[in-house]
Amino acid sequence: MKKLALAGLIAASVSTPVLAEKANRVGLMFTQVEADISVYGLELTHAAQGWGLEYGRQLNRVFGINLSYDNTRFVDGYDISNLKLGTDIGYEFQANETTVLKPYVEVGVNYASEFMGDNDIYRDFNHYCGIGLRAEMTSFYIDVSKTSSWITVANTPFDINYPQYVVSAGFTF
């Protein structure tokens, strides 16, 4: 009985029409990172800012998919690039006649590339999760979120907690 109820809930959420007339969005991201790096028990924190692009599609009131790319440059010449594919799970509701709000949790996979100058330091897949709030107006959206990735660099003593604060804005179509 529980499995039947769960299947019915999933089918209803997938078949529910989108409240917003425009389901696609594309925009620019501004990122703030505070990477906590652990090396042999020594904790280091580095802060940096970056820019990126994102595309998203709202599948229904509950589920959306997101694809984004960002590049963050630290002061010492250290760069991290992220290619993320994830889903946001929340509930989209009408705030007023022209605005739709969606608080959500986000989970997905992240392909991270790290560079120091011209040297390729690390490339690998990891997971990420986070929370956010998106507001969609007539042809415009703004999204505020915080995600975290956890990276253990193979064959090194480096463990990185990578919280990323993101503000993005763009167009819906």
Image (tube, rainbow, N blue to C red):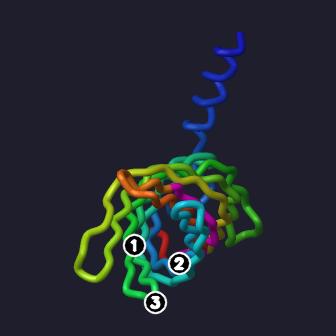
- Horizontal and vertical percent for residue 140? 55, 77
Residue at horizontal 57 percent and vertical 62 percent from the top: 161
Please state, as top left, top right, bottom left or bottom right, where the C terminus lies in the image: bottom left
Instruction: Specify the principal SS of the magenta part.
Output: strand
* Residue located 71% across and 10% down the image: 1
Task: Report helix, strand or loop for mark 2.
Answer: strand
Query: Residue lying farthest front?
Result: 40
- Work out whether mark 1 precedes mark 3 in sequence or the reverse, and give the earlier one: 3
Q: Is residue 62 visible?
A: yes
Vertical placement of residue 54 versus 84, above or below: below
Left/right placement of residue 89 relative to residue 151 reads right
Residue 21 visible: no
The three-letter code of the residue at mark 2 reads Thr
Depicted 173 relative to depicted 47: above or below: above
**Res 128 label:** none
Q: Read off the residue under disc 3.
A: 75
Crowd around label 2: few <14 · some 14–19 · many ≥20 (10 Å): many
Frontmost of labels 1 and 3 is 3
Give, as a single range, the part of the protein colored magenta.
139-150
Q: Residue furthest bottom?
A: 75
Residue at x-position 55% and y-position 49%? 107
